[in-house]
Amino acid sequence: MFHLIMDQAFTRQKLKELRAMVGEGDRVAIVLQDDPDPDGMASAMALRTLLGRNKQTTPLFAFKPVTRPENRTMEHLLEIEIQPADTEQLRAFDKIAMVDVQPPYFSEKIPRADIVIDHHTGYPGGAAEFEDVRTKYGATATIMTEYLVTADEKISERLATALLYGIRSDTLALSRRVTDDDLLAFTRLVRLANYSMLRQIDRPELPLSFAQILARAMKRMVVKDRLVVLNLGRVERDDLIVQMADFCLQFEGVAWVAVAGKLGSKLVISVRNHGMSGDNAGEVVKNLFADIGSAGGHRNMSKAVIPLRAWRRREGTTHDAQVESRLRELFSARIKGEADDGGVRSAPGRTGN
Ligand SMILES: [Mn+2]
């Protein structure tokens, strides 16, 4: 079925062009967008396989490193090494390729682009000798899967896991902008991927020290006005704050969660709600904290990052218990306010990928 629906003639032609372009001894750099995401990382691995290359001859680069915990886990578990990009260093490569992104994204930082494979809309095109931009696709990993199938390449477990995760994350688990092509690529990869690895990527390992923090916090947890507010105090990673916020939202009677923690010299606050009625988590944090830190997000999830010094200046103290009670006051007043206004609505979350 896959073969009937895939546009293999087109892909076969492009594959021929792609391979003809890259000489055997050429050093190829693959450049990813800032803070690379799973679709980009998976597509880069696939391009390397298609060109019959390895980490030495075809390294991956990004101007800003991976930050999301899940993506870092993917990078680590699948041993995807991404080096910091440098314009001068890139100039020395015989070919510069980019996947899941296009040259204008980088403006002057990229000396040139030779190979571009992507699914994003809104770029003029024509910036590289080889281009394959399929804007109707949900993920670049889908395009890459078609290339691999057309080329009759063996898709390793590691590569299949990466591509499957790339498609899944760009299409929000096949719920957003998913096309038949994405579904077919997904189906093709399902049998090849490593599910225990996928589970590990979904649920990054927690540091043991977090158990104590968790135990103390859970004892204090109360639900008032359908709101849970906790300050975890000092934590070693900000995803622990995010995971805690997600966890607390699962309890009965909870509609809103705000979990804070101190990370370095900052207070990080992660906010969640169920997105019923007009609840808008992004607006709430902006209203509460835009004057002392960065604050924003979507209807269902938002975040504020506040320098502890700025918090102290406005609120008087950064003592953990007092931070928690102050946050409870602020959120409880704000959320009631929102409900009284009938809720402030805004556009749904960004659809970037
Ligand atoms: Mn993508």
Image: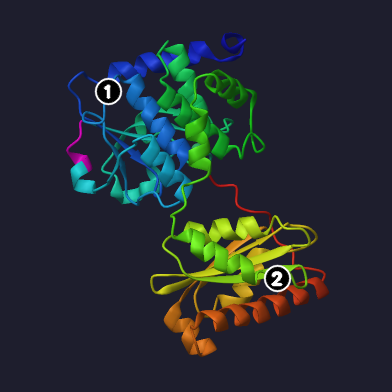
Query: Dot 1 lies on which element?
Result: loop
Q: In this view, does 30 lie to the left or right of 187?
A: left
**How many circles with numbers are drawn on the protein?**
2
The circle drawn on residue 122 is none
Q: Please give the residue where the numbered disc 1 appears in the rendered image.
A: 53
Please, what is the three-letter code of the amino acid marked with disc 1?
Arg
Asked if residue 14 is positioned above or below residue 335 in the image, the reply reads above
Asked if residue 187 is positioned above or below residue 222 in the image, the reply reads above
| 193 drawn magenta | no
Between the C-alphas of marks 2 and 1, the distance is 55 Å
Q: Give the range drawn in magenta.
A: 90-94
> How far from the left and from the top, in percent, is residue 270?
57, 64
Q: Please give the residue where the numbered disc 2 appears in the rendered image.
A: 222
> How far from the left and from the top, in percent, is residue 165?
51, 34
Query: Dot 2 lies on which element?
Result: loop
Residue 131, visible in the rendered structure: yes
Q: What residue appears at the point 58 percent right and 33 percent down from the top-left corner?
A: 138
